[in-house]
Image: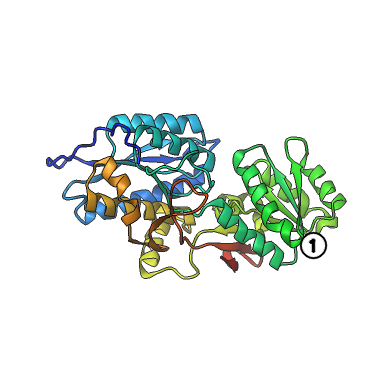
Amino acid sequence: MSTPPSPPAAERPDGSPVRIGALVPLTRPGWAEAGRHLLTGLELAVSEVNDAGGIAGRPLELAVRDTAADPQKAAAAVAELAGLGVAAVAGEYHSVVARAAATRADAVGLPFLCSSAVLDVLTEQPTEWVARLSPPQSHGWQVYADFLLGAGHTRIAVATQPSVYWASGTRILRDCLAPRGGTVIELDMSALTPTAVSDALVDHRATALLLLVGHPEPAVPIVRSVRRDRRLAEILIGAPAGQPEFAEWAESLGDDGAGIPFLRYLPERLSPLGQRVGTTLRERLAEAPSFVAFEGYDTIAVLADVLRSHGTDPRRIAESWPRVAVEGTRGRIRFTRTPGISVWQWAGPPIQVVDRDPAEPDRFRILHTG
């Protein structure tokens, strides 16, 4: 593998902290609620590592940087953190931002364990420096396409905005649906109002509308418009990117936000570890923890195991990805090389299609598993 100069993270016997950079969206236009859940999971795992003696007696410490969904800000943060001598970088929720962070981490020779971003191509060329916990978009969104077809939907409209992430999602859906008789109709939200979306759904005889757009704008107005249009009483609204997972969605839309299937990366039944961590996450968040909070916890669980076994030298950390075998909150984590994916990938993360129960919007229903 290529060996760029390593950041100055030499072993220290003096009990000084082992630092990990944490990239999280904490302010707008980033999805701050997702960032809060991700950071809570990261921080809980760090506190448990330190309660158990740290890393060879040294405390583990996060150096948190707010990416605010800005790729340039994330890339600059990686460069800064490398200069500060962190052992590795972790986190990030937004796929386009994670791609910028991964590219810079590869360039400077800093290990990056991506927690929650799914875009298949995180780096243009294969890299040894980056590993990822969340499933690649091509896999998760294929599971979602299978769900749509199983539910009898073949005319799918997607309300979309300009973005590499949304364009990739549209392409994956089309590639999965077209061979089995499905049609994907793109509705460009840079040119349509929410009311015009409703008219377009009627004109195209769509039976499902997928929200490949930002939250709260324009996702919330689109949902309200479609829900109030009697012509569309039978249409399925879906959000594969996971917007309905968070309490902010339910608070914004109330009953209108229920019955909207989305992808969630949790198993049907949490392990004893997952149950224990889930209880503590709920206490810290004062609400039900999202799958993103569990991803944050698992990120530190992996890095702590690597640091204990291989030390804090960045090159040795990167070389350890194929030897990881860690029991996380959502299953046993191992990294492999997956065809078409340029980074080390956890090949077995759980995937569900769930929605909020219209009869009880705080309860999630599992509709399909992949």
- Residue 187 image point, x, y percent: 76, 44
Q: Is residue 138 left or right of residue 20?
A: right
Question: Which residue reaches farthest left?
Answer: 14
At label 1, the amino acid type is: Glu
Quarter of the image for residue 130 reads top left
- Residue 366 image point, x, y percent: 58, 68
Quarter of the image for residue 197 reads top right
Q: Is residue 82 left or right of residue 248?
A: left
Label 1: few (<14), some or many (≥20) within 10 Å?
few
Residue at image coords 66%, 64%: 147
Question: Which residue reaches farthest front?
Answer: 1
Q: Is residue 72 left or right of residue 221?
A: left
Image height of 2 relative to 303, above or below: above
Question: Which residue reaches farthest right?
Answer: 203
Locate the N terminus by quadrant.
top left
- Looking at the picture, tell me which residue is in the foreground, 258 or 283: 258
Q: Which residue is mark 1?
A: 234
- Residue 176 image point, x, y percent: 67, 57
Residue at image coords 59%, 51%: 241
Q: How many marks?
A: 1
- Looking at the picture, tell me which residue is in the foreground, 221 or 237: 237
Inspect this view and state whether residue 168 appears. yes
- Looking at the picture, tell me which residue is in the foreground, 262 or 35: 262
Locate the C terminus by quadrant.
bottom right
- Residue 68 image point, x, y percent: 49, 35
Inspect this view and state whether residue 31 appears. no
Which element type, helix, strand or loop, lies under badge 1?
Answer: loop
Image height of 327 relative to 37, above or below: below
Q: Is residue 76 left or right of residue 51?
A: right
Residue at image coords 29%, 37%: 86
